[in-house]
Amino acid sequence: MHFTGILDSRLLMPDSPPPSRFAALLKKLTCLRSAPRELWIIYAAYVLENIAYKCGAGNVIRLWLHSDLGFSHMEASGWIATWSAIMTLIIVLVGSLTDAMGIRRTFLLGFFVCLVARCVMFLTISRWIVLPFGLYLQAVGMALMVPVMIAGVKKFSNAAQRSIAFSLYYALMNLGYAIGDGIFDRVRGSEAPGVWVLSCCGRTFGSIDFSRLPFGLGENGHWVMPVLGMELTSYRALIFLGAVFTVPGLLLVWFFLRDGVEMTEDGVTVTPRPTTTDSGLSWIATLWATCEETAAKTVSIFAGLWRQPAFHRFLVFMTLVVGVRMIFFQLTFTFPAYGILELGPGAPFAHITGMLNSVMILVLVPICGVLTQKVSAYRMVMVGSLISALSVFFIALPPHWFQPLADGWLGKVIVHDWLGVAGRVNPVYISTFIFIVFLSIGEALWSPRLYEYSAAIAPHGQEASYMALSMLPYFGGKLAAGALSGWLLKEFCPETGPRHAEIMWLVVGCMALITPVGAYVFRKHIQVHEDGRAEDA
């Protein structure tokens, strides 16, 4: 009877079409409409912080240490390596702090620490003030915000929304980086924006004066702050802009992010944090107790993980991935100094190394995800990392090999039309452009699937521990990358004397090949079964 009823109901509606793919896609894209406002605050704060990172850290750190603080490239590399390693280590350890303080308080602490650090970095050049209370303090602030942002996206979305919520999170990360790279080039460039006149249909509605902003300063220019009258170098002006972009994120969280909000399968729930009549230091006592308990559990879990063969395979895999990650470390630590020496002061290379990469990732990641969803994550990491590693060899080739392309239509479109650089095209622009295009294609294939494979290899119930400890190989990798950066510049790309920059990038490319070659050689030992996908032979 039940079976007949089903048949009858289908016969009564023979013309009911299945939902179209477009409708299904539209439903996925609009599923975040029911998310609480806190999710959108997280997104806005994330974009602002990524812009601030690109201005106040990122590309500018080496240039600031070298030009403003007077460190050699070798000395600057030591500070960069320590700074980067400290940030990575704190990210691993900061989970208990977030649990004890809550998302809002941790956010506020992170933004406040970053704001203080960035202000110190542009207000003074005294090494013994600016290094501990500026550079290293900023590492602490940024490390506080990375895990809390990820936790916030998860908490403010339900199971049906989570996939699109994290996809949008990844996209907005690249949007913030692209804007920050654009600002980095505009400040260091020679063209000032001037006054923009707002007009339409022959009518003028007003004007905006950008001439007092720190744009078009040149590589070694100076800018006088309108109110304080303080003179800042180009790099300190960039750090000042990083502090400026920190303020709206801080205000957004302070005034609009509520405590105790969570998106459940039944809708948005708000559970205010309990208030006490005790001393205002009571939450610190709670924080300390929670940290002690979490530390004990972490030690116990970590000791247990070392007894698991799966964890050994996982660490080997993540250590191999450090090879291809070296490309991105060197793009941040080494390329700015290299770009200025090879392309000249004020060269807008961040448009290629940063903006182009971010935009391509923004477009390619969802496309690659759809087209390769039936391919194992392990194979995608092998293939994608191979493409990314081989891409480095384009800038390891002699630049004059690219001169015909530089003198043709490609050079005109990229350098003259897009970057606005006049004169004969330097072939390094072309080799860098091709390098970044192939790097981005490879990254779009392997980077998102890396986290999928990490989740697949982790035993059920221990995914969080595995993901937190996945940062440990990066801790060593960033220490090595920072130190290697200074040595490469000193040996192959010095400020004076003959340069052999192709050898520098050849070294980086060979190190990047460790990932695909190692993944292939050790595939029988570290690859695990992925549901719905066949293992590679």
Image (cartoon, grey):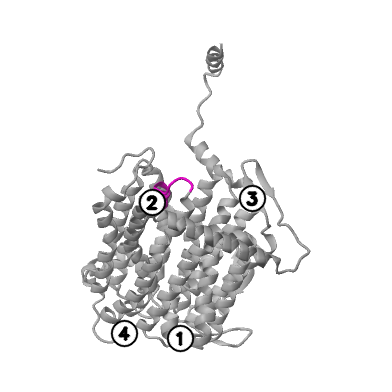
Q: Is residue 459 magenta?
A: yes
- 536 left or right of 223? left
Q: Which residue position is annotated with label 1?
A: 68
Specify whether 258 is left or right of 95: right
Q: Which residue is mark 4?
A: 495
Q: Which residue is mark 3?
A: 262
Residue 410 seen: yes
| C-alpha separation, residue under disc 3 versus residue under disc 1 | 45 Å
Mark 4 falls on what kind of element? Answer: loop
Q: In this figure, which residue is indicated by the disc labeled 2?
A: 308
Which one is in front, 254 or 291?
291
- Disc 4 crowd rating (10 Å Cα; few below 14, some 14-19, many 20+) is some
Task: Decide which of 49, 98 is in the foreground and name it.
Answer: 98
Mark positioned earlier in the residue sequence (2 or 3): 3
Part of the protein shown in magenta:
449-461
The residue at the point 31 percent across, 67 percent down is 432
Does residue 306 belong to the magenta stretch? no
Whole-angstrom CA distance, mark 4 to mark 2, is: 50 Å
User: The N terminus lies in which quarter of the figure?
Assistant: top right
- Residue type of the residue flagged with mark 4: Glu
